[in-house]
Image (spheres, helix red, strand yellow):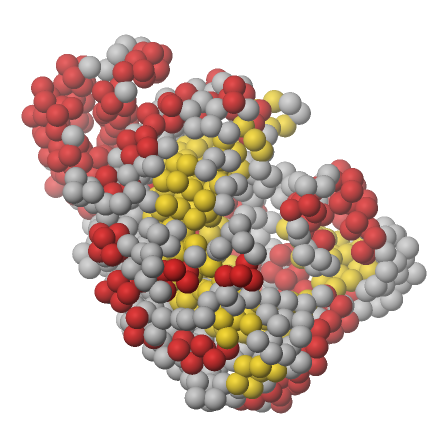
């Protein structure tokens, strides 16, 4: 990752020269010289992206540059840490064998420069003829993938699933990785006949290191709302509850990617073996498991794709359609054949073809297809697993250098993990992977990077936001394995996942001192108690599902082990106190922290590099004593509490970089604050909204001056009074809201439905969420209302009984979610006339279910795509 390392170090040196020049007084000239050298290397690395694949000499030079950059990066970061906090002297001594002084930095920079000079050659002599004209791929909007092939297998499995037996029928779908087991199972899970036959359908992703409790809770979620009391129960009690729910009734459970017979024994304890109406579909790579679980019948072994299926899938992935120009037909069929019936291989190769040359240039496309065909054919005789890895490697090598680091970073997340895109993007930015591009924010550039990876079929879309942006994404297990293997190799030393098996960590704790990124997704407490030491670790990510309280004796385990951290995701770790050495982590750029405190200490202001600060607390309020206005890099501040911020002072120079701020108290929403944070895109306010709207506290009217604000969350919180006493009798006029507003959430406001006419005048509103009794009243008459641009409407916990509306009121509606609207008699049938309306979700809205079915039937008659989901599960329909 020489390219990303050089880019980040350049930015780091620039900040050092601009903002912290007092730290490098005696060696400023050497640092400036190094900065100039790095710019030369950056230019060379960009020019050699493709040439390095063809020249071992260039590859060696690139590795040398990377090693040199890492060495300087470590020294400079260590020096800054040491210069900032004198208490780190012992740590630096242990990590670097001697204290890092200004004089040492100068000598090390000089030594590095000599290494670079010795490795320098005339770059012009290294230029290799480059026949590939298109350096930058044609980025196309991500598309939802069509499910292709296995029609006969699908029909066979559906027939088996819909045939009654005298026992709980377990069907195992077995096949090697990359064959499409998950895709086929998902297709069957959503098949119209299956949905009609099984009122209860549950999809479970089973990873190598799954938690029994998480699986049991995922099943229970289909039958009841998961309360904190329920989540606190142990596995034994939860398993009994699951067994009770499954004992009667017709259900289908899909367990995707079960790894072993031991795992199956853990899972089957909740299955009622005598319920002949129940069906279980397992996908697995292990034939022995399939035979063991499917008794008395044999498992179904998934075949390879036929040539016809392969060619169809390749065209869809490479061209986005089945139509193919005759000039590409012959070479395309050859590529499809050479993928040897592996759907994942076809998808990966299709991703290369889709982004390598513009669709408008047929000659260029033909050259690319022929070139790819030759490379694919070279791997024909390899083992299928090796062949698949070579195809992934081929796609990886074709990535622009700035995408390679972003792709490998996906190996930081657990298997089958649903990755929140906003989180991923902010972590990428914190790592320094995102380049500055004129006219685009770092976040916008990162979104384009992700779209590029999706178009190359290296990442898949999981969920979409109402505004059409990607909410969550996933990565195939084979691709994740590639990321971890490549990233953990000696040549990269990019990241390492620490696993706990049979009481032993692998790799061993003593080996982590040379790693640069660590992921620990199980037994994190044991890991921290083992006193790890990682002086070169830049990212520490812990994503187990269960929270755990960090004993006070171990509260310094993270800052004591990793002084040079840039990214810290420690959400599951609940701190009972913030250790003083946490404020020594001055290189932190992204941090997710959980604690049971009511205040954010003032010393957090010392973390001047922080870009994203996310705080989760058990307290209802958070007194932010840290002056966020002195944190010059801060872009995103989020907390689940009502945060009271310090007022911007005269010496507080920053705030213009802030894009996300929430949730802040009503009192903190002042004119001064909103003026300082003029670039906000997302704002959340929690507190006594009546006082804010009436001008008694804060300055709601100042919101109208915010020209970039797109998302606003207004949470009415009158605690310790009952929420019902916080009923609002006034709502600001439409012209008092920002004109740029695209998403609005109201919570616990108890407004009358007549105020919906005000919200209907928000011209750019696309998503409206009315949560926890935001609006109350028996009747909602939509007379005079028209939400011109509204695409998504969410309503929950209301006493609404009669709703009168038509397609005229919501001409662009795409999705409607109704939750806990138990008194709603019916959903306006006229909504079926909206051409764009394609998704309706009901959760505990029993009386309204018949009208939902009627809307579904009307849509079906029009042959329109429409998804309807009704909870409880026994009311679910196709």
Q: Is residue 857 left or right of residue 619?
A: right
Above or below, 331 against 229 in this view is: below
- Look at the image and tell me whether residue 59 can be seen: no
Quarter of the view holding residue 357: bottom left
Image quarter in which the C terminus is found: bottom right
| Residue 24 at x, y percent in the picture | 13, 23
Question: Which residue is nearer to you in this view: 480 or 73?
Answer: 73
Please name the residue shown 37% across and 32% down the image. Answer: 601
| Residue 710 at x, y percent in the picture | 33, 64
Above or below, 763 against 630 in this view is: below
Image quarter in which the N terminus is found: top left
Quarter of the view holding residue 323: bottom left
Q: How many marks?
A: 0
Above or below, 660 against 550 in this view is: below
Please name the residue shown 72% across and 66% down the image. Answer: 873
Please name the residue shown 78% across and 42% down the image. Answer: 237
Question: Which residue is nearer to you in this view: 348 or 569?
Answer: 569
Q: Is residue 205 left or right of residue 471?
A: right
Above or below, 37 against 789 in this view is: above
Quarter of the view holding residue 722: bottom right
Question: Which residue is nearer to you in this view: 420 or 822?
Answer: 822
Please name the residue shown 63% across and 38% down the image. Answer: 209
| Residue 279 at x, y percent in the picture | 80, 60
Q: Is residue 770 left or right of residue 134?
A: right
- Look at the image and tell me whether residue 31 can be seen: yes
| Residue 432 at x, y percent in the picture | 29, 41
């Amino acid at each position: 990752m020489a390219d990303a390392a050089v880019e980040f170090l350049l930015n780091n040196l620039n900040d050092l020269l601009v903002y912290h020049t007092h730290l490098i007084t005696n060696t400023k000239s050497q640092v400036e010289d190094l900065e100039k050298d790095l710019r030369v290397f950056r230019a060379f690395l960009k020019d050699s992206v493709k040439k390095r694949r063809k020249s071992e000499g260039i590859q060696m030079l690139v590795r040398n540059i990377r090693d040199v950059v890492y060495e300087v990066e470590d020294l400079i970061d260590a020096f800054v840490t040491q210069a900032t906090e004198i208490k780190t002297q012992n740590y630096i001594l242990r990590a670097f064998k001697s204290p890092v002084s200004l004089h040492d930095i100068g000598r090390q920079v000089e030594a590095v420069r000599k290494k670079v000079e010795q490795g320098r050659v005339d770059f012009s002599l290294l230029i290799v003829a480059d026949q590939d004209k298109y350096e930058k791929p044609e980025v196309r909007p991500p598309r939802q993938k069509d499910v292709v092939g296995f029609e006969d297998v699908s029909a066979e499995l559906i027939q088996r699933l819909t045939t009654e037996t005298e026992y709980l029928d377990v069907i195992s779908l077995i096949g090697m990785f990359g064959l499409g087991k998950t895709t086929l199972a998902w297709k069957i899970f959503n098949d119209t006949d299956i949905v009609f036959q099984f009122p209860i359908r549950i999809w479970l992703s089973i990873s190598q290191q799954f938690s029994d409790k998480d699986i049991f809770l995922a099943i229970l979620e289909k039958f009841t709302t998961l309360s904190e009391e329920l989540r606190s129960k142990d596995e034994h009690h939860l398993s009994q509850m699951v067994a009770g729910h499954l004992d009667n009734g017709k259900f289908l459970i899909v367990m995707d990617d079960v790894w072993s017979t031991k795992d199956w024994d853990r899972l089957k304890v909740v299955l009622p073996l005598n319920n002949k109406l129940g069906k279980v579909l397992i996908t697995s790579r292990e034939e022995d498991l399939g035979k063991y679980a499917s008794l008395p019948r044999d498992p179904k072994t998934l075949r390879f794709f036929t040539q016809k299926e392969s060619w169809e899938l390749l065209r869809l992935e490479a061209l986005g359609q089945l139509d193919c120009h005759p000039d590409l037909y012959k070479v395309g069929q050859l590529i499809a054949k050479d993928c040897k019936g592996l759907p994942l291989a076809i998808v990966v190769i299709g991703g290369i073809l889709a982004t390598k040359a513009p669709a408008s240039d047929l000659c260029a496309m033909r050259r690319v297809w022929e070139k790819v065909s030759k490379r694919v054919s070279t791997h024909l005789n390899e083992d299928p697993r090796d062949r698949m890895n070579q195809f992934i490697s081929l796609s990886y090598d074709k990535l622009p250098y700035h995408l390679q680091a972003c792709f490998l970073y996906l190996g930081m997340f657990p298997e089958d993990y649903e990755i929140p895109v906003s989180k991923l993007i902010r972590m990428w930015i914190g790592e320094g992977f995102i380049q500055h591009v004129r006219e685009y924010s770092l976040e916008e550039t990162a979104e384009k990077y992700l779209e590029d990876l999706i178009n190359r079929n290296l990442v898949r879309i999981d969920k979409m936001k109402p505004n059409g942006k990607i909410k969550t994404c996933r990565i195939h297990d084979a691709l994740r394995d590639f990321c971890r293997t490549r990233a953990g190799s000696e040549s990269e030393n990019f990241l390492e996942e620490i696993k706990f098996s049979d009481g032993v960590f692998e790799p061993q704790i003593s080996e982590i001192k040379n790693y640069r990124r660590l992921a620990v997704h199980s037994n994190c407490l044991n890991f921290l108690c083992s006193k790890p030491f990682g002086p070169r670790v830049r990212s520490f990510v812990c994503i187990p599902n269960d929270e755990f309280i960090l004993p006070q004796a171990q509260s310094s385990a993270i800052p004591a082990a990793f002084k040079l951290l840039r990214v810290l995701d420690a959400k599951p770790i609940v701190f009972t106190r913030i250790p003083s050495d946490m404020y020594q982590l001055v290189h932190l750029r992204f941090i997710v922290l959980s604690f049971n405190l009511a205040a954010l200490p003032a010393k957090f202001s010392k973390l001047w590099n922080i870009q994203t600060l996310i705080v989760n607390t058990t307290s209802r309020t958070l007194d932010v004593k840290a002056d966020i206005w002195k944190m010059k890099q801060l872009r995103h501040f989020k907390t689940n509490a009502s945060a009271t911020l310090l007022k911007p002072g005269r010496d507080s120079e920053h705030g213009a970089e802030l894009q996300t701020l929430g949730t802040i108290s009503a009192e903190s929403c002042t004119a001064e604050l909103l003026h300082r944070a003029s670039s906000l895109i997302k704002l959340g306010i929690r507190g006594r909204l009546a006082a804010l709207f009436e001008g008694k506290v804060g300055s709601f009217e100042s919101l109208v001056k915010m020209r970039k604000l797109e998302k606003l969350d207004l949470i009415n919180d009158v605690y310790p009074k009952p929420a019902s006493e916080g009923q609002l009798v006034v709502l600001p006029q439409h012209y008092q809201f920002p004109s740029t507003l695209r998403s609005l959430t109201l919570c616990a406001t108890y407004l009358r439905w007549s105020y919906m006419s005000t919200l209907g005048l928000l011209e750019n509103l696309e998503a409206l969420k009315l949560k926890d009794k935001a609006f109350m009243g028996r009747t909602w008459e939509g007379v005079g209302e028209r939400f011109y641009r509204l695409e998504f409407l969410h309503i929950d916990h209301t006493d609404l009984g009669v709703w009168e509306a038509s397609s005229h009121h919501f001409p662009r509606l795409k999705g409607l979610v109704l939750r806990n609207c138990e008194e709603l008699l019916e959903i306006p049938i006229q909504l079926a006339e909206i051409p764009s309306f394609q998704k309706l979700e009901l959760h505990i809205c029993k009386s309204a279910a018949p009208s939902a079915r009627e809307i579904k039937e009307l849509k079906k008659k029009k042959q329109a795509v429409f998804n309807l989901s009704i909870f409880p599960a026994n009311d679910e329909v196709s």
